């Protein structure tokens, strides 16, 4: 017994000696015990209940509080003014620790890199979302959206689990736009393996993230989960490398010339082969701006970012539309005004005219932002009003809660697309589903275009019905916001459907 008391005393003395005073300790938050902080208070919470527990914290501690877990201090913010200071900071752009678990897969691509490397990559990749390149990608969106409608028509079940169907749609779409590879047409073993591998890696990262004892590499890679993760990395990297090599071999001098022409001459667009993001990265390599490893990093990054986030937004969107017949009918009528009785696919111009659909998508993203939190690892001290936020602190911006503040959005739980059409002026950081500031989402126009294509095509051909009127799923926050249980929607073909 004496040795135990002695050990406790020694630990307490060491804690008092090494524990550094921090201005954030004056902020409210869960009770902090010596050494462990509030870690024990978070243990034992079921994973699918953790998100709801986090939603309760601002009611207890206000819109600025701190979680201290061992030697980590995590500042949580919900105020628009605080969020602007954090996200607009030009140097505090480093992502927080959970992103480290993605690095073995994505490398130091645009999502994870920081400092001068991030600035260089951002400069290289920004032109890939030039207006005319997005016009080129729209051809893929149109084809995949039409294929999605055909698939939904052929499904035997009345109640469709939209997460599975939409996940395939977005993965196939990003594969073709990022890599130029048609996964839905390629029935080869490697393509099928890659499709499954991408999903498996995401699941394995989430499992690791939610189990604190798996965070250290030395432990994780000795477990069954870590070994499976490594095997999946080999498959994913090998497939990406083969696609890159194959794409390089197929490029001809004439095709290289088409890259620059594509920006200047829209009339020749139909005669050119379809460009992928990969083509533009290879061009950057030819110009000495990026190496082969960098190409792989960015292809894998866009495969991840452009797949799961859009799938979740569309799935939640279909759930909301199915529960609001008036909204889907307004979308249908808007499409009728644009297309008349024609069954043609939408052009770029058509998509820009879909103002009500755009407002609907914004309202979907307000209620269910695909990324509910944004994390930063602070690398330079800064002031948050009168509070000093010191280097090495982590900050978590709560987008989900920000979007549901009644002082910004009256009746915040109600689905009202009209709130984005009434001309109301809001703080520029009050609606940030694609983040904001220097690290805002480079692909936000890409994502909006893809969602417009998919939802307009679905509403033109189906009436949507909720499996259970007014039901809303329990939520969990992984890398993206997810429902705990499946989302079921009925897709009833319209009588005028010609597809």
Image: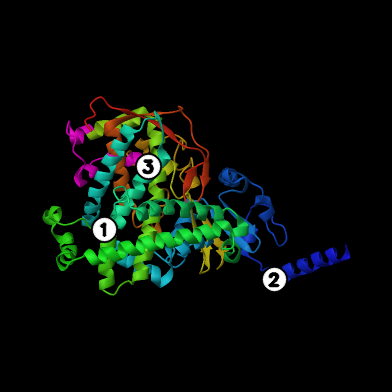
Splitting the image into 4 quarters, where does residue 292 fall?
A: bottom left
Quarter of the image containing the N terminus?
A: bottom right
**SS of the residue under disc 1:** loop
Choose top left, top right, bottom left or bottom right for residue 217: bottom right
Q: Toward the viewer: 479 or 441?
A: 479
What residue is disc 3 on?
166
What is the magenta range? Answer: 336-364
User: Mark 1 vs mark 3: which is more N-terminal?
Assistant: 3
Q: Secondary structure at mark 2?
A: helix
Q: Secondary structure at mark 3?
A: helix
Q: Nearer the viewer, mark 2 or mark 1?
A: 1
| Marks 2 & 1, CB-CB < 8 Å contact | no
At 27% across and 27% down in the image, what residue appears?
Answer: 494
Quick check: 499 left or right of 45? left
The residue located at (40%, 72%) in the rendering is: 116
Callout 1 crowding tier (Cα within 10 Å): few <14, some 14–19, many ≥20: many
Query: Residue 18, which numbered label?
Result: 2
> In whole angstroms, how far apart are the C-alphas of marks 2 and 1?
53 Å
Q: Which residue is mark 1?
A: 276
- State the image coordinates of residue 99 (x, y, percent, origin top left): 49, 60
Q: In front: mark 3 or mark 2? A: 3
Give residue 51's position: percent from left, percent from top.
Answer: 56, 45
Q: Quadrant of the C terminus?
A: top left
Determine whether, in the image, residue 472 is placed left or right of residue 442: right
Decide: few, some or many residues near mark 2? Use Cα within 10 Å; few <14, some 14-19, many ≥20.
few
């Amino acid at each position: 017994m004496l040795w135990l008391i002695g050990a406790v005393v020694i630990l307490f003395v060491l804690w008092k000696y090494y524990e550094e005073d921090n201005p954030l300790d004056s902020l409210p938050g869960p009770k902090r015990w010596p050494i462990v902080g509030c870690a024990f208070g978070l243990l034992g919470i079921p994973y699918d209940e953790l998100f709801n527990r986090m939603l309760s914290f601002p009611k207890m501690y206000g819109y600025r509080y701190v979680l201290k877990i061992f030697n980590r201090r995590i500042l949580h913010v919900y105020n628009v003014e605080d969020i602007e200071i954090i996200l607009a900071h030009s140097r505090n752009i480093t992502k927080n620790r959970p992103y480290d678990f993605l690095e073995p897969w994505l490398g130091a691509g645009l999502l994870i890199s920081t400092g001068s490397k991030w600035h260089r990559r951002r400069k290289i990749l920004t032109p890939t979302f030039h207006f005319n390149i997005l016009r080129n990608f729209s051809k893929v969106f149109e084809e995949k959206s039409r294929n999605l409608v055909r698939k939904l028509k052929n499904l035997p079940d009345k109640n469709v689990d939209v997460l599975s169907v939409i996940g395939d749609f977005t993965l196939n779409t990003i594969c073709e736009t990022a890599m130029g590879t048609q996964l839905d047409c390629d029935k080869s073993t490697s393509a099928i393996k890659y499709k499954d591998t991408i999903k498996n890696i995401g699941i394995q990262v989430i499992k690791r993230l939610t189990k604190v004892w798996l965070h250290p590499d030395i432990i994780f890679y000795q477990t069954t989960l870590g070994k499976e993760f490594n095997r999946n990395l080999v498959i994913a990297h090998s497939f990406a490398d083969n696609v890159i090599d194959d794409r390089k071999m197929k490029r001809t001098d004439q095709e290289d010339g088409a890259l620059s022409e594509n920006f200047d001459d829209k009339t020749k667009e139909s005669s050119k082969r379809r460009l992928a993001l990969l083509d533009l990265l290879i061009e950057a390599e030819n110009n000495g701006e990026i190496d082969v490893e960098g190409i792989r990093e960015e292809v894998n990054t866009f495969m991840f970012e452009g797949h799961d986030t859009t799938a979740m937004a569309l799935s939640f969107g279909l759930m909301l539309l199915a529960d609001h017949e008036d909204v889907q009918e307004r979308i249908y009528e808007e499409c009728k005004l644009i297309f008349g009785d024609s069954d043609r696919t939408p052009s770029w111009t058509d998509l820009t005219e879909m103002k009500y659909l755009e407002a609907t998508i914004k309202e979907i993203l307000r209620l269910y932002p695909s990324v509910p939190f944004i994390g930063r690892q602070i690398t330079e001290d800064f002031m948050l009003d009168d509070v000093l936020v010191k280097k090495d602190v982590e900050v978590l911006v709560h987008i989900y809660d920000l979007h549901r503040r009644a002082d910004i959005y009256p009746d915040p739980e109600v689905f009202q697309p009209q709130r984005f059409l009434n001309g109301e002026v809001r703080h520029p950081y009050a609606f940030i589903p694609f983040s904001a500031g220097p690290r805002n989402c480079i692909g936000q126009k890409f994502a909006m275009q893809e969602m417009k294509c998919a939802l307009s095509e679905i509403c033109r051909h189906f009436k949507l019905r909720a499996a259970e009127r007014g039901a809303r799923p329990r939520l969990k926050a992984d890398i993206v916001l997810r429902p705990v249980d499946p989302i079921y929607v009925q897709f009833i073909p319209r009588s005028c459907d010609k597809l």
